[in-house]
Amino acid sequence: LNKEFDIYVRRAEGDTLQEIGEAYNLTRERVRQHCSKFERAVMPMILALAQGLEDANSDHYIKEDQVLSVFDNDDYDKIFIFTLRNASSYDFVGGIFFNKEHYPRAEYDLIGIVSDIVGDGINLFDEIERIESALDSAGYGFIEADDFLNIVIEFNYCFYGDYIVKNKKSYAFLCAQLVEECFPEGIKYEDED
């Protein structure tokens, strides 16, 4: 079991089956089997702990920070998060675990909200109230600004200072957008001579 624990922790840290196999002189398939066996053993406990965290929120979500506060052991934290991410009853979006029974469309809903609000690009701080209102009316009022930023990052949006855009944009494009937004009359050069 200690070997399975160590293998599972390495998998939770992001090591590939190949890397772990080489370290333990195992095939990738054997590493996968060890991970599956360990996960089956700990899944009931992880789901019970997750239910306790959901109950503490009085709702059906868990923030990653809450998971990290359960154990005072980094390996246990990694196991908890990795196992919960693999649980079929949860979706993990932007640092939040959503109970699929109560939020069956969480990822889809959040992609829609981000897409509607950000569009081609926004100044984040100019749109905070609109973001909060959209999240609240969709039933995600518990998502705070930091959580929203994590969601935006997960959906591959880019940040340029306070600006969020869907895809990487050139500096010239962003400057043109700022000029258009901040100087609707344009910028004129006046010669003082």
Image: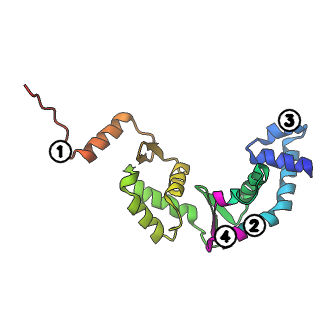
Residue at the spot of label 2: 49
User: What range is drawn magenta here?
Assistant: 51-66
Q: Residue at left 11%, top 28%?
A: 191
Instruction: Find the distance from the CA under tag 3 to the CA under tag 2.
Output: 33 Å
> For the residue carrying disc 1, how many other residues have a C-alpha within 10 Å: few (<14), some (14-19), or many (20+)?
few
Please name the amino acid that badge 3 sits on.
Glu
Residue at the spot of label 1: 185
Quadrant of res 131 = bottom left
Q: Nearer the viewer, residue 52 or 37?
A: 52
Q: Is there CB contact under 8 Å for labels 4 and 1?
A: no
3 or 2: tag closer to the N-terminus: 3
Q: Nearer the viewer, residue 63 or 108?
A: 63
Which residue is most to the right? 1
Which secondary structure, mark 3? helix
Please name the amino acid that badge 2 sits on.
Leu
Residue at the spot of label 3: 22
4 or 2: tag closer to the N-terminus: 2
Instruction: Find the distance from the CA under tag 4 to the CA under tag 3.
Output: 39 Å
Q: Residue at left 62%, top 70%?
A: 57
Q: Residue at left 84%, top 42%?
A: 28
Instruction: Find the distance from the CA under tag 4 to the CA under tag 1.
Output: 52 Å
In the rendered image, residue 62, in percent from the top left (x then y), is placed at: 64, 64
Which residue is most to the front? 72
Q: Is there CB contact under 8 Å for labels 4 and 2?
A: no
Instruction: Find the distance from the CA under tag 4 to the CA under tag 2.
Output: 9 Å
Q: Is residue 83 above or below residue 175?
A: below
Left or right side of 35 for 182: left
4 or 1: tag closer to the N-terminus: 4
**In the image, residue 130 lies in the stretch drawn in magenta:** no
